Image (cartoon, coloured by chain):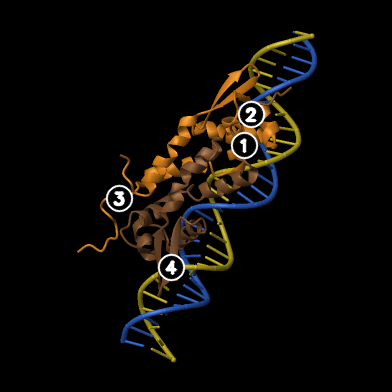
Chain colours: A brown, B orange, C blue, D yellow
Amino acid sequence: MNSSSQNPTRPALHPDDADEYASWFRCLADGTRLLVLNAVATADRAMTVGEIVDRVGVGQSTVSHHLRVLAEERFVHMQADGTRTLVTVNADCLQALPEAAARIMGFDPA
Amino acid sequence: MNSSSQNPTRPALHPDDADEYASWFRCLADGTRLLVLNAVATADRAMTVGEIVDRVGVGQSTVSHHLRVLAEERFVHMQADGTRTLVTVNADCLQALPEAAARIMGFDPA
DNA sequence: TCCAATAATCGACTATCGTCGATGGTCGAT
DNA sequence: ATCGACCATCGACGATAGTCGATTATTGGA
C-alpha cells in the first residue's frame, strides 16, 4: 500500500535544484539591489557605477557590492571602459523566472 | 540639458515597491523552504506538518518556521484539523512572479 | 481523567547579509 | 611623472535568518 501523498504527475524538486533556485531568488531578495537592477534595466544606454550611485542614493561601495552579486548570477553584465565600468542588463535572466516557478509547483518544463 | 540615461518609456521602480517585491522574493530565497513549498505543491491532497517533516528531512520546528513564512506571504494556506494542521498550496501567488519581473525590467503592466 | 499525538513557540547558537568608511589600484590627462 | 577620477576591495559593525533541541499548548481517544 502507498500512503504517500505525492502526485506522480508532478515531479519533486531535487535538493540541488532547490538550492540553485534559492540562490537565484536570493539575488532579488533585497530592495536596494532591485533598485540597482531597475536603474540599469530602465536606462536607454549602459550606465556607469557612479550614475547608479547618484540614482539609487546609497554609498559607492554598496552599489559595487550589489553589482557584483547581480553579475555573479548574470542579471547584469559589467565591462571595463577606461576608469569606468559600463553596466548593462541581461534581459534573458528574468525571463527564466516563470520556468523556475513552474518547476517549484511541480509542472514539468515542456 | 538632460544627461539622464533613463528611458521615458520604462518607468522606474518606487522604493516601496522594491521592498515589497524583495520581501516576496526573500520568501523563495532558501532551499529548504522551496522544498517545503514543492512538497505541498506536488501533493495530490492536503499535507500535515509531520508528513512534510518526513519528506524534507529537517526538524519539526524548522518546518513549522518555514510554513509560517510561506503562509505570511500567502504561498500556502494552513487550516487546523484537530491536533493536525492541513497545508495546501496557493497556486495564484507564483503566477504573479512574471509580472513582478516585468516591473523590475521597467515594462509597464498592461 | 489521563495519556498520546501533533504542532507551535521559545531560547540559543551560528552563519550570512547589507551598509558604511577607508584604503588601494587602475586608467587617462596634464 | 604626477594628479585626479573612478571603481574594487577590505574591515568592521549591526541586523537578520536558518537550524536545532526543549518546552508548552491543544486536541482526541482510552
Question: SS of the residue at dot 1?
Answer: loop
Disc 4 marks a residue whose amino acid type is Gln
**Quadrant of residue B70 within the rendered picture:** top right
User: Which quadrant is the N terminus of chain A positioned in?
Assistant: top right
Q: Nearer the viewer, mark 3 or mark 2?
A: 2
Relative horizontal placement of residue A104, taking residue A30 as reference (left or right): right
Dot 4 corresponds to which residue?
A79
Q: Is residue A81 visible?
A: yes
Question: SS of the residue at dot 2?
Answer: loop
* Distance between mark 1 and mark 3 Cα atoms: 38 Å
Percent of width and height locating residue B52: 65, 31
Disc 3 marks a residue whose amino acid type is Arg
Q: Nearer the viewer, mark 4 or mark 2?
A: 2
Q: Which residue is painted at 70% across and 37% down in the image?
A: B57
Chain that bears disc 3: B
Q: Residue B88 versus residue A52: which sits nearer the camera?
A: B88
Dot 3 corresponds to which residue?
B10
Question: SS of the residue at dot 3?
Answer: loop
Tags 1 and 3 on a common chain: no
Q: Which residue is painted at 38% across and 45% down in the image?
A: B102
